[in-house]
Image: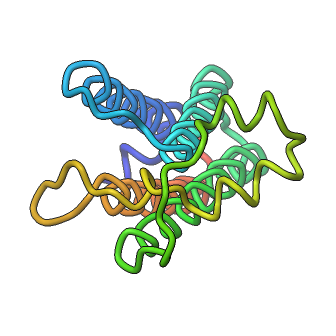
Amino acid sequence: MLAFLRRPRLPFATLALVCIGLISYGLYLQYGGHLEPCPLCILQRYAFSTVILVAIAATLHGPRRQRARLFYGGLLVIASVLGAGIAAWQSYIQRFPPDLAECGPSLSYMLESFPLSSSLPMIFRGAGDCTAIDWTFLGLSIANWSLAAFVLIALAAIVAMRQPAPRS
């Protein structure tokens, strides 16, 4: 296990591939399973995409110095914590739906029609489609699995950035 982590590119490439797989499965559920993503689901995809971009940049760079590993790992932790927060909020409103759970406008409509400062509160208020649980696996919803994935990504990034720099 330590030999895997001491390779400067491998942990980051693995994170990128895992997140590409997660987004691919989400797209399969959307287009193959006809499950329309809610605004919070879209924001989680953005967080996964950010993890992918940072992980690919780290893979291409192959950070050998500890400072570079801390930089990339820190960015990955920030992206995954933001994604985990969104997934945790969606898991919460799925468990405890608001009294007035009504279908709201789509994310693209909100962002095109309102400034970001007005759109964000509407997104996090949770439209009715954000509270719906259309798919489960082992009793957990997509938001629950997304939360677990973001926590594991953050932990993996912390472990990867704490490893000593490889010897030349």
Q: Which residue is painted at 57% across and 60% down in the image?
A: 86
Q: Is residue 103 above or below residue 151?
A: above
Q: Is residue 140 left or right of residue 8?
A: left
Q: Residue furthest left?
A: 138
70 or 45: nearer the viewer: 45
Q: Which residue is painted at 25% across and 26% down in the image?
A: 34
* Residue 145 locus on image (x, y percent): 31, 57
Q: Which residue is painted at 63% across and 64% down in the image?
A: 125
**Across the whole image, how many numbered discs are drawn on residues?**
0
Q: Which residue is painted at 72% across and 38% down in the image?
A: 110
* Residue 59 locus on image (x, y percent): 57, 27
Q: Is residue 121 left or right of residue 63?
A: right
* Residue 53 locus on image (x, y percent): 63, 28
**On-image quarter of the C terminus:** top right
Q: Is residue 16 left or right of residue 30?
A: right
* Residue 99 locus on image (x, y percent): 48, 78
Q: Is residue 20 above or below residue 6?
A: above
Evaluate whether residue 3 shows in this view. Answer: yes
66 or 37: nearer the viewer: 37
10 or 57: nearer the viewer: 57
Q: Quadrant of residue 111?
A: top right
Model colouring: rainbow
Q: Is residue 107 left or right of residue 128?
A: right
Evaluate whether residue 168 shows in this view. Answer: no
